[in-house]
Amino acid sequence: MIRIVFVALMVMVAWCALIKLIRALRTSNVDWTSVTAAIAFVALAFWLRHVTGIGGF
């Protein structure tokens, strides 16, 4: 029962953080090219780890 309450609480906190992040991004001037490049770099790293099997824990 405590696990369910804890998970529900964490979901609510994550949802509130996501809403605040979206509101902050709407009002700020963000360089989307850099953000996209960073996300692509991370995605490429995970894909290469999956394909080659090198890296990880």
Image (cartoon, grey):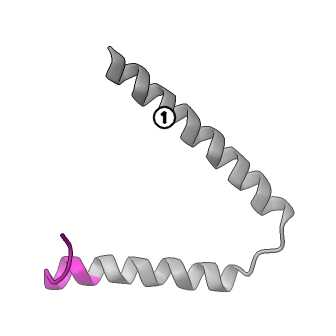
Q: Which residue is mark 1?
A: 10
The image shows residue 15, relative to residue 1, as above or below, that is: below
Quarter of the image holding residue 1?
A: top left
Q: Position of residue 54 (x, y in %)?
A: 16, 84
Q: How busy is the neighbourhood of tag 1: few (under 14 within 10 Å), some, or many (20 plus)?
A: few
Residue 41 at what x, y percent from top left? 45, 84
Q: Is residue 33 left or right of residue 55?
A: right
> What residue appears at the point 81 percent right and 60 percent down from the top-left corner?
26
Q: Residue 47 occupies which quadrant of the picture?
A: bottom left
Question: Magenta residues?
Answer: 48-57
- Count of all numbered marks drawn on residues in the image: 1
The image shows residue 27 at horizontal and vertical percentages of 86, 61
Q: Quadrant of residue 55?
A: bottom left
Position of the C terminus, as image quadrant, is bottom left
The residue at 50%/35% (across/down) is: 11
Q: For this view, does 41 lie left or right of residue 53?
A: right
* Residue 5 painted magenta: no
Q: Residue furthest top?
A: 1
Q: Is residue 26 above or below residue 6?
A: below
Q: Is 16 on the left-hand or right-hand side of 54?
A: right
Q: At label 1, which amino acid type do we have?
A: Met
- Residue 22 in picture, x, y percent from top left: 71, 54
Could you tell me which secondary element the residue under label 1 belongs to? helix
Up the image or down, 16 lies above or below 50; here it is above
Q: Residue at position x 74%, y 81% from top?
A: 31
- Is residue 9 toward the left or the right of residue 36 in the image? left
| Residue sitting at x 58%, y 80% | 36
Considering depth in this image, is 36 or 21 the residue closer to the camera?
21
